[in-house]
Image (spheres, grey):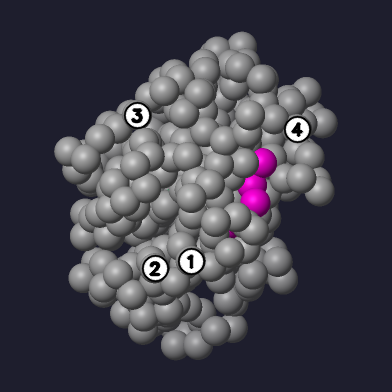
Amino acid sequence: MSVYILGIESSCDDTSAAIIKDNVILANIIANQEVHRQYGGVVPELASRAHQQNIIPVIESTIKKAGIVKEQIQAVAFTRGPGLLGSLLVGVSFAKAFALGLGIPLIEIDHLQAHILAHFIQNEENPHSIPGFPFLCLTVSGGHTQIVLVKDYFEMEIIGKTIDDAAGEAFDKASKIMNLGYPGGPLIDKYAKEGNPAAFEFAKPHIPGLDFSFSGLKTSFLYFLRDRLKENPDFILQNLNDLCASIQATIVSVLMDKLQKASSQTGINRIAIAGGVSANSSLRTNIMDAQKKLGWEVFIPRFVYSTDNAAMIAVAGYYKYLKKDFSNQMAIPYSRSKM
Ligand code: KG4
Ligand code: ZN
C-alpha cells in the first residue's frame, strides 16, 4: 500500500512543504522571502518571522494541491538541521504539533543528506533516471561545499569539504562586491551568459587533497576590482558580463578539478551534483561535457530540486519511513552539520 508523507523545509529563507506518495511527488510549494533582498543577505530574525507567517498557508495549499486530505498523511518529515536555529524551530515545532494532532510518526531529516536524496524524487509525468550506489555527489550550496561518497540512502561519507567559504558564498560575495544584489548566484549566472569567461584571470586556490577554499578567490576579486576602479570608476558597469563570466568560470573550474580528482581516487564515475549552486548553467554544462569526455554517468537534479525545497525532505522521509526510522517530540534543531 502506498504511503503519503508531508515534508517540511524551513532551514534558511524558504518556507516549503511537499506531499509525496511513496517516492512520487504530488505537490511541492516554496514561498521565497523577499524581505531579505534589501539587506543583501538573509537576516535571521526576519527569516523566522516570515516562516511563522508562511507556514500555515504553505502547508494548506500543498495538501490541497496534492488532492488529498490531511487524514491521509501517514508521517511528517522535517528538516532538523543544519540551518538557522530560529528558522528551523518554526518547521520543527509545526511538524511536532501536526504529528501529535494526527497521531502519526515524525521523521527528522538532515538538510544536506536531503539535497543528495533529491536525485531519488520521481515525477509521474516525467520519470527520471536515479543513481545507483555507490556514487559521488558534489553538494554545493550557500552554506556548504562537499564531495560526498554516497554508499546507500543514509550511508554517506564526506571525502572533501571547504575549509572556509562555500561555493554559493563565493558567488554571493562576488555579487555583493559588484553591487548586484542577493542571492548572487543566479544574477552572476545570468550576466555570465553574455560574457567572455577568459576575459579576466583570478588566482585559483591550491589546497591539497579533495578540500576546497574560496576565501582567497573572494579577496583577489576584491583587490582586482579596487585597483581597476581607481583607474576607471565605471569599470564594473562596462565589464559586468565579462567579470561575471570570468569569476563563474574560476569557481566552476575549481569544483570540476576536485570532482575529477575524487573520481580518479575512488574509481567511481557515477557523479551527481546537488544544492543551490547545482542550478548554475556553467556547472551543468561542464558536468554534461565530462559525461562525454571522461565517460562519467552524470545525474543533474531538476532545477526546482536544486535550491531549497521540501520535496527532497519528503523523499528522504520516505526512505526513513521504510526503515521505521522515526524521531520523537524531544527532537531539537541543530545549526551545524552532523554529517
Ligand atoms: O541550497 P540552497 O538553496 O540553500 C542553502 O542550503 O544554502 O543554495 C543557495 C545558494 C546561494 O548561495 C545561491 O547564490 C546559489 O545557491 N545559487 C546559485 C545559482 N542559483 C542559486 N549559484 C550559482 N548559479 C546559480 N544559478
Ligand atoms: Zn540547501
**Image position, residue 174 (x, y; %):** 43, 65
Residue 181: tell me if it is visible.
yes
Is any atom of residue 204 visible in this view? no
SS at mark 1?
Answer: helix
For label 3, the residue is 326
Say if disc 3 is inside 8 Å of ligand 2: no
> Is residue 127 part of the magenta span, yes or no?
no
Q: Name the image quarter holding the N terminus.
A: top right
Label annotation for residue 56: 2
Residue ranking furthest to the bottom: 233
User: Disc 2 and disc 4: Cα gap in Å?
Assistant: 34 Å
Q: Residues within 10 Å of mark 3 (few under 14, many from 20)?
A: some
In the rendered structure, find residue 198 and report the number of the disc placed on it: none
Q: The disc labelled 4 sits on which kind of residue?
A: Ser
At x 63%, y 33%, the residue is 2
Separation of residues labelled 1 and 4 (CA atoms): 31 Å
